[in-house]
Image (tube, coloured by chain):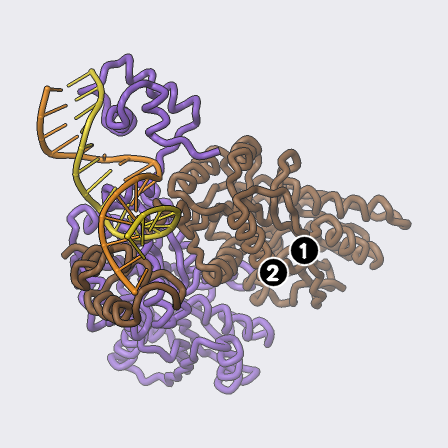
Chain colours: A brown, B purple, C yellow, D orange
Amino acid sequence: MKRPSIKDIATLAGVSVATVSYVLNKKEGQRISEETRKKIFNIAETINYTPNKIAKSLKTNTTKLLGLIVADISNEFYSHMARNLEDKALKLGYTLIIGSSDENAEKFKKLTELFSQQQVDGMIVAPVAGSEKTLENLINNKYPIVTIDRYLKEVEIAGITINNQEIAETTTHLLLKKDFSTIIYIGYKTELPHLLDRQYGFEKAVRSSEKPVEVQYILVGLDNIAKEVHLQLEMMLGKTPANAALYFSSNKLAVAGLSYIVKNNIKVPEQVSVVAFDETDAYDLFPTEITYIQQPIEEMAEEAIKLLDEQISNYTATGKRVTLSAKLVPKASLK
Amino acid sequence: MKRPSIKDIATLAGVSVATVSYVLNKKEGQRISEETRKKIFNIAETINYTPNKIAKSLKTNTTKLLGLIVADISNEFYSHMARNLEDKALKLGYTLIIGSSDENAEKFKKLTELFSQQQVDGMIVAPVAGSEKTLENLINNKYPIVTIDRYLKEVEIAGITINNQEIAETTTHLLLKKDFSTIIYIGYKTELPHLLDRQYGFEKAVRSSEKPVEVQYILVGLDNIAKEVHLQLEMMLGKTPANAALYFSSNKLAVAGLSYIVKNNIKVPEQVSVVAFDETDAYDLFPTEITYIQQPIEEMAEEAIKLLDEQISNYTATGKRVTLSAKLVPKASLK
DNA sequence: CTGAAAGCGCTTACAG
DNA sequence: CTGAAAGCGCTTACAG
């Protein structure tokens, strides 16, 4: 049973395919008598006609498909982002194609190629280290594209970021005001600018601090996060830490660190204080409520789609960047 | 700058588009002299040609696009499933379009229509209550489709499920063997068969139990899960429970319940024992390691894609169902 | 070894 | 108010 086409309707209605196309697509009014309209709608209904968007796409050169590349869709931050993007996209009639780059520049490139071949109208991407060339090519070809979460230093590209450095700095100042003997920054060994910004903000605040404070860093790679964090925390905190503060620069790192804390029965905030970038449902299972930095995911998604839709409508890539504000949500984990 | 087409290559190479098409697509050998091949490949390379899959799709009636409908992509179970499906799909050359139904039959239907219009080659869906008609229509139209996670009683449809009832029964027997004064089942108010199966398994084990045991049920709706679970647990457990066991039929419910337990400083497993369906990173932050039932997500994804690919290759919908085994992962939370 | 041509299902300027 | 026709970028049977 072949899927019915516009031609089938035309034949059944005794009119041309052009007429059918006009009736089915055009805003009410103009052309076509009410009688033929009715007839065509009826036939379309009874034979269960649905348009073939592929054919339409070929003609109109627009697919209403958007490509989304995240580092890993199973990561909580990205799955929430994806969900918000999905909702915002749907409102403008777009559907999302999704791919995970695994922080691999080669795979990232493959995905952009795949999406471009699928003729997506635009892409929303979280760039990975080493993807500069890929993005530059896309931009040079006027491919509508926006970045989310991340950006790349050398590439001028439209996108959404948050005030990573600023919020990190503010938060750190807050830590510095309380008299911790040690502040430990837990972050990534990385070149990704948005993550480095978080670290710069932290360092900047530390440098400007009046009173001296001992600062330590735990910087981990992307593999075996939990194990690395546990090991290093053990060395630094020992079993009976006193008056330390931990600054986690992502929710994954926080989960890794908090799991160490729970397992060793360290009291928060009595023995160590905790503040973390990003939220996660997991905090609910920790004995103390966690102070965290909240990114405006919904707003980020909305702005990203808006920015992309503008580019698509104007057939251009722009370098327009939007910066949104994360905010600190104070809870009991910070003394 | 228009995207180069096969025609541009043909012109530059001084051959026909047919020849270009053959060279670019066909397995090595046959037809076409090595010389023209070389030339065509070179030109394609230098003008940066990438095929327009839309055009190909229109001709070949296949898009290499798969539609995935989950209840909510930001739900941990589904985002992990999506990730696994993505990987398996990519291996067979498919790309995933994703949509969230929000347990809403109307939205579910909209998504299938959208995907069908986008001419996806097949769909992987987690059906919602009330989506029987929608699925039957799809199947009647020979649309390749498989269900994941869930199934519907009245519809014969290919798909992957796990041994929900059986694993629930086995696990409950384990609980019954230990001398708990009370066993509380925490599940959903729902019509979804796969969730009811978990409850049937539990009930069946309870009925067959030799020694009498007090059994209570907490059944919640989909909204405000945390609050409802907290309230009911408070009534049933009080502040100082003794010797009770909690059986959570999903990870979301478990997180809700465990957060109550943590906040009230109830000791696991000393005061209550806990077992939960599905895993989540959140367990890491709970003081006691949680005993949970592990679904073979990767295998489920692999089988789903395989089943779907078979249907696509054979142009048919089948009712073939695959059942995989979840297994209990014993940890300290079960005394 | 290679090309001319039809056709996939639409849209849309043009003509009447 | 309506239709004939070209064309989007491919694939592929057919002919040579």
Residue holding disc 1? A324
What residue is at 67 percent from the left and 60 percent from the top? A292
Pointers 2 and 1 in contact (CB under 8 A)? yes
Q: Is residue A242 above or below residue B248?
A: above
What residue is at 30 percent from the left and 60 percent from the top? B148
Relative placement, left or right, of B7 versus A236 is: left
Spot occupied by residue B44 in the image (x, y as percentages of width and height): 38, 24
* Of the pair A282 and B221, the residue shown nearer to us: B221
Q: Earlier in the sequence, mark 2 or mark 1?
A: 2
Residue holding disc 2? A299
Q: Quadrant of residue D1?
A: bottom left
Disc 2 residue crowd, few under 14, some 14–19, many 20+, Cα 10 Å = some
Q: Quadrant of residue B239?
A: bottom right
Relative placement, left or right, of B243 versus A171 is: left
What subunit carries mark 1? A
The C terminus of chain A sits in image quarter: bottom right
Relative placement, left or right, of B280 versus A246 is: left
What subunit carries mark 2? A
Q: Quadrant of residue A281?
A: bottom right
* Of the pair B29 and B217, the residue shown nearer to us: B29
Q: Which mark is residue A128?
A: none
Q: CA distance from mark 2 to mark 1?
A: 8 Å
Q: Tell me the kind of residue under disc 2.
A: Glu
Q: Tell me the kind of residue under disc 1.
A: Leu
